[in-house]
Image (tube, rainbow, N blue to C red):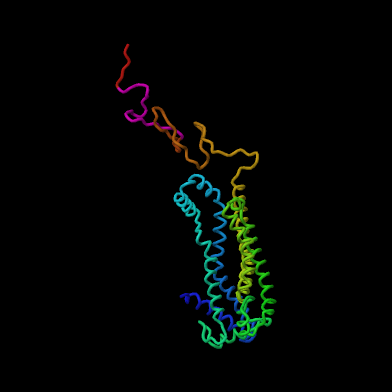
Amino acid sequence: MLNFIYYPVSFILWCWHWVFGKVFGESSGFAWALAVIFLVFTLRAILFKPFVGQVRSMRKMQEFAPEMQKIKKKFPNDRQRQAQEMQKLQSEHGVNPLGGCLPMLVQIPVFIGLFHVLRSFKPGWGEVYFFDKQGVDSFVNAKLFGTNLSTFITMPADQLAQYGTERLNVILLSVPLMIVASIATHFTARHSVARQNQAALDNPQTAIMNKLTLWIFPVGVLVGGFFFPVAILLYWLSNNAWTLGQQHIVYKRIDAEEEEKKTTTATTRQALAPKPGAKPVNPKKPAPGAKPANGAKRMPTAGPGGSSSSSDGANGSSNTEIPGLTPGRSTSKKPGSKKRR
């Protein structure tokens, strides 16, 4: 049913086992352990860009979190209207909530696929997806510090005997992996929570999720270690180690970008702002009758009767023409009018 997950997972595992098998030997426990670890690294490298998008999306959502709280207060009893307004707000800010969940959603089927593939490696079995019978026997016979990677602490004694592994050896290898994986899970969540602003921390839903990731998930890893095969514990530990390092690198780069933007914005504002004590310079209008500066055109001025007049550059005389009047005639007398005694 889930072969579309099992085949890709087993293929990546097969590739890395082929690589490390050339170095340590095909039936080496180190070769199989490194194959599982680099399966995780391959997946996380593919999801690196979506993870960066997830971080940016979370930062943007933190910026307009107060606006989302205003929407909840404005429509306290209308869930549908709240969802519409929040979707509109997210669209305006270019935020996709589902995009932030992509890295986590993709890891779930990979975890299930790896768990199923490893559980399929049993003594006497034939082909398992991309692995032939020789590959399956190689995994069954491989030992890491005397422990087979498919065994777990609570495995029945008859099954442990099939793998030729003692329960004490499983405990000595699994317990340290469980503790380190649990601590790594806690510090990964702690590093992520430390990036949240005060508005996000005050959100009740966020506070509940933070408690889950900080304490419940690490305890879940610790308890689940009694039932998880050694290979799954290696997967969980390497996954959290990668996440912790990736968060440090990505957060540092994004912080540097935001600091650079703030510096650029402050420099631009400082350059445009007037100097302390200096008055803003406004362009002054020329006084009436003042000569224009060299090379500048003189603006037409209103003449008698509301007509415009301009200076003649050739002889310096001004000519004013009014419709209906003969040039040279005074404007004080109308044409044809005579003085009566």
Seen at 52% across and 32% down, the residue is: 287
> Magenta span has 86?
no
Where, by quadrant of the figure, is residue 330 drawn?
Answer: top left
Q: Is residue 229 visible?
A: yes
Q: Viewer-proximal residue, 62 or 117?
A: 117
Chief secondary structure of the magenta portion: loop
Q: Give the range drawn in magenta.
A: 316-335
Viewport quadrant of the C terminus: top left
Spot the residue most to the top: 341
Seen at 54% across and 48% down, the residue is: 69
In this picture, is 134 found above or below 13? Answer: below
Q: Viewer-proximal residue, 291 or 237?
A: 237
Is 79 on the left or on the right of 179, as rendered? left
Where, by quadrant of the figure, is residue 208 drawn?
Answer: bottom right
Could you tell me residue 33's position as x and y percent? 63, 79
Where, by quadrant of the figure, is residue 119 drawn?
Answer: bottom right
Could you tell me residue 181's position as x and y percent? 65, 69
Could you tell me residue 141's position as x and y percent? 62, 86
In this picture, is 262 found above or below 136? Answer: above
> Magenta span has 331?
yes
Spot the residue most to the left: 336
Q: Is residue 23 visible?
A: no
Q: Viewer-proximal residue, 164 or 335?
A: 164
Could you tell me residue 281's position as x and y percent? 58, 39
